[in-house]
Structure formats: structure tokens, C-alpha cells
Amino acid sequence: MRILLTGSTGFVGRHLQPALQQAGHEVLGGVSPARAARSPNGVAMDFARDTTPGAWLPRLAGVDCVINAVGVLRDSAARPIDAVHRDTPIALFEACAQAGVRRVVQVSALGIADSPTRYARTKRAADEHLLSLHARGALSALVLRPSVVFGRGGDSSALFMNLAKLPLALLPGPMLTARVQPVSVHDLTAAVVASLGRDPGPSGVLTCAGPQALSLAALVASLREQNGQRPAQVLRLPDLLTALSARIGDLLPASVPWCSETLAMLGSDNVGDATAFEALLGRPAVAYRDLLAQAWR
């Protein structure tokens, strides 16, 4: 197929584009206007401003499938979260319906269904709009909702790896209690490729998660063990200091994954049933004990 991949230079997109090409698809990689001059084969797009269907229709000529892999953790002037997660994706999905693009894959996030955070609300709005187009028969839609995605190039993955190097870890309370099911970025991309190889492909919402749930602190401890290091001493950061550290994170560049929004999202587990995900893969998903060997590459 001829595929328009938004966010091709992001964490998931950088892994997804070569996987799609290896499967025989032609990929039009979406890049920011600032990068367009350095990417002769890229398609310039601005998720902060392309908030109408008309902005997308010219880019969809001859496109069979659109995969949206754009996401931000928090709001910023350069990448306003309302536009990036909600307004622009909705405009893109409407344009797909108008242009006759029959297949749309949205890379969303697990744990947004009931979360009151701005991240979750904006992601959820785009998901629901896409699913409504699917329900009306305007297109075929698959919404992927992964738990914590682990792999080289991910900001949160780099944070976990850096924490795993410390012999003494002072961790926020939610990291000791909130459970996740980390998923390899390679498993996530393999699921996207597999979904495009079926006719009809899977549709609706698909939970993408590893086979086991554990706390973030336990994940960091496992990464340390996988790297051949002795267990670290773990202390709980007092709640007041946890809140203060998150507020400090709000003032740092948007690529820093620790902020007030992250702290709020840790208030609930990020887990789900991985059965359908593994069925699509045709094999078990990578376990957290094997992430360093199989995902950090």
C-alpha cells in the first residue's frame, strides 16, 4: 500500500517506517516544516496548525492508508496539545473519509479511557472521532492503545535506563505502586505491519501490552538486573517533594518526561488484556525481563 505516516521522525515512527518498507509498502513520511528541507522524501506537515480537512486533502492523493503516530506528553507553545492530539488528527481523519482513504491506524495510549488529564482527554477525543467514522462506514479504523512503550529513542525509556544505573534510587511514590505492562517498540511496530497484511484488517480498539504487569520501580529494577548490576537500594520520595519535582519538570523542555501531567497519569494502572495483541503478532509479546536484549536495539 501507499501509506502516509505522520510522526515519522518520532520515537515510534522511526521504528515503524523501516518496518513498513521492509514489508513492501511505500511510505510517505510526515515531517515538520523545519525538517522538510533536510528530508527530500518527506511530506511537510504542521500538527500545530493543520487543523482543517482542507489542509490534508492534497497530501492524501493516491494514499491507501494513514497511520498517525504523532504525540506529545504535555502542552507547549510550539506543539499545543489540543491541536496535536485532538484538532489536527480529527481534521486528518475527516479528510481521509472525504478522500476515500479506506484504512486509518491511530497510535493512541492505554489508560486514557477514564483519566481526567489533558493528555488523556485530547487523545480520547481523537480516538472517539475516528471510531465514529468507522461506525458510519466512512473508513476502516484501528486504534492502538499501548502501555509504556520501551525501546531505544524513547524519552521515558531513556529515563528508566538512567534510573537503572543508580545504586541508590529515590523514586516518587506512584512509581512504587502504579502498574504498567511495558511493550517493546518492535512488537508495537510488528502489530501495525501485521494489521495491514490482513483483509479485512482488525478494527476498533486494540490494547498493546506486554504479558506481565509490574510497577515502574520493579521495571527499573529489572532493567538494572538485565544489565548485570546488583540490586539498588530504593527509597520513596516524600509526596511533597514528588509534587515539587513534577512542578520543576513542568519548567524543563517538553522532551523531559517527568512533569505534573506524568504524575497525574501515574494515579492509575496502565494495564490490559494482551490476548488480542499477541494473536495479531502470532507469538507471545516480549516479556519485561527480556526488554534490554530484544527492545533496546
Image (cartoon, rainbow, N blue to C red):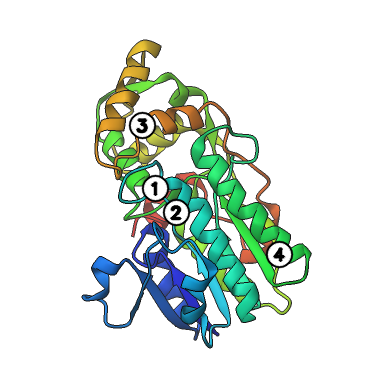
Q: Amino acid at mark 1?
A: Pro
Secondary structure under the numbered disc 3 in the rendered image: loop
- Label for residue 259? 3
Residue at the location (65% across, 63% down)? 142
Instruction: First in sequence, mark 3 or 2: give its number.
Output: 2
Instruction: First in sequence, mark 3 or 1: give its number.
Output: 1
**Dot 1 corresponds to which residue?**
80
Q: Nearer the viewer, mark 3 or mark 2?
A: 2
Q: Nearer the viewer, residue 51 or 233?
A: 51
> Is residue 118 positioned above or below 274 on the image?
above
Q: Nearer the viewer, mark 3 or mark 1?
A: 1
Q: Amino acid at mark 3?
A: Cys
**Dot 4 corresponds to which residue?**
133
> Looking at the figure, which quarter contains the N terminus?
bottom right
Instruction: First in sequence, mark 2 or 4: give its number.
Output: 2
Location of residue 31 by image quarter: bottom left
